[in-house]
Image (spheres, grey):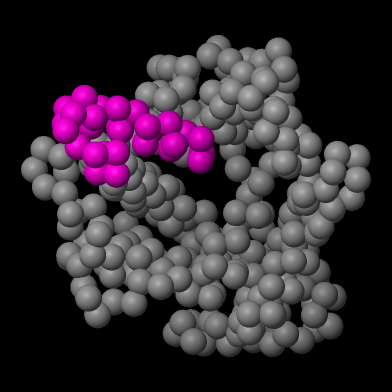
């Protein structure tokens, strides 16, 4: 994704230079950077968040509010936004334009850490982006794939770190409140029994065992993975509350928010940005890519 957006930045820089040949290098860079930032905001808020939180999760934008604190909360960065660690799959798909596996094959996640040659010498980023757009994420739950539970950042063939343990320890190092105390702070009712956290008996029993039947000891990240999902969203109630608050503050407290800094035709053009368009513009991926890359066209395709 970094490579993709560097390419988009450079594409814009060439376009700006062609239209305004008298601009300095710094001026061209800053104009391109400003547009790329706006594109990322549009993609995040118009494509990604409606899938993650539901279509009408966020309040309507009312303009920049200088009284809003747009900083990142500890609960967001250290717990809630680490929800993606549960969504990972053990295999990175590499597909050709016909949706078939490339001659170089798919890649296991554990073999992809610190392995840029898999991009530079094997078909570049196009096949991976096709694969990402074709593969369903795993369920948001308390289960983590082995590739990051035992092999995180390890050399091929060697053991690595345990991401789940790192997340739990990081939350404690950062002084996060417990799962129940965070619910109370957010205005949500505290869980009195493990069945209040999850309706799944297996989750309940595993939590009871891990926390020695003391519900008030449950870590925020763990409890947030175990909860039942909010209707129409991929996330659970406590993470929903944290994410909604964070992304609204990031938008409303940002004086450089794209709707506050672009006007007229330029704003209209930026609002039409999609991640699919940026991928098509900067790779060999073409019309085989669906319009919304966050939603798999065939729900039964590559669901492993």
Q: Is residue 125 visible?
A: yes
Which residue occupies the foreground of this view, 133 or 119?
Answer: 119
**Residue 294, how many percent across, how many down?**
46, 39
- Where 101 sits versus 222, above or below? above
> Residue drawn at (55%, 83%), measured in percent from left and top?
182
Q: Quadrant of residue 54?
A: bottom left
Q: Does the segment drawn in magenta span residue 4?
A: yes
Foreground of the two, 258 or 12: 12
What percent of the width, then of the height, locates residue 252?
27, 67
Q: Classify the position of the C terminus by image quarter.
A: top right
Image position, residue 3 (x, y; %): 51, 35
Q: Position of residue 113 (x, y in %)?
A: 73, 42
Q: Which span is picked out in magenta? A: 1-28
Q: Residue at x 35, y 71 (%)?
A: 70
Q: Please tell me which residue is depicted at 22% across the width and 76% down the height of the picture.
A: 66
In the visual, does 126 lie left or right of 166? Answer: left
> Does the magenta stretch mainly form a helix, a strand or a loop?
helix
Asked which quadrant contains residue 286, the reply is: top left
């Amino acid at each position: 994704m970094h490579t993709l957006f560097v390419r988009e930045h450079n594409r814009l820089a060439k376009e700006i230079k062609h239209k305004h040949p008298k601009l300095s290098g710094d001026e061209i860079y800053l104009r391109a950077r400003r547009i790329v930032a706006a594109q990322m905001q549009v993609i995040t808020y118009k494509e990604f968040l409606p899938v993650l939180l539901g279509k009408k999760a966020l309040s309507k934008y009312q303009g920049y509010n200088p009284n809003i604190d747009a900083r990142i909360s500890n609960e967001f960065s250290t717990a809630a936004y680490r929800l993606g660690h549960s969504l990972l799959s053990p295999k990175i798909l590499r597909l050709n334009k016909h949706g078939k596996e490339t001659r170089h094959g798919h890649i296991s996640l554990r073999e992809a850490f610190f392995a840029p040659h898999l991009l530079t010498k094997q078909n570049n980023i196009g096949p991976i982006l096709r694969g990402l757009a074709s593969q369903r994420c795993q369920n948001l739950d308390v289960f983590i794939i082995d590739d990051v539970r035992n092999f995180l950042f390890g050399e091929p063939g060697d053991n690595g770190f345990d991401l789940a343990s790192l997340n739990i320890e990081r939350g404690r190092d950062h002084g996060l409140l417990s799962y129940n105390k965070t619910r109370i702070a957010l205005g949500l009712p505290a869980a009195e029994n493990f069945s209040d956290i999850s309706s799944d008996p297996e989750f309940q029993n595993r939590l009871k065992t891990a926390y020695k039947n003391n519900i008030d000891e449950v870590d925020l990240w763990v409890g947030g993975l175990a909860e039942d999902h909010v209707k129409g969203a991929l996330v659970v109630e406590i993470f929903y509350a944290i994410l909604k608050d964070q992304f609204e503050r990031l938008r409303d407290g940002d004086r450089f928010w794209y709707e506050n800094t672009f006007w007229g035709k330029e704003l209209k053009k930026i609002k039409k940005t999609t991640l699919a368009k940026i991928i098509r513009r900067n790779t060999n991926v073409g019309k085989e890519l669906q319009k919304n890359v966050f939603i798999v066209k065939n729900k039964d395709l590559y669901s492993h």
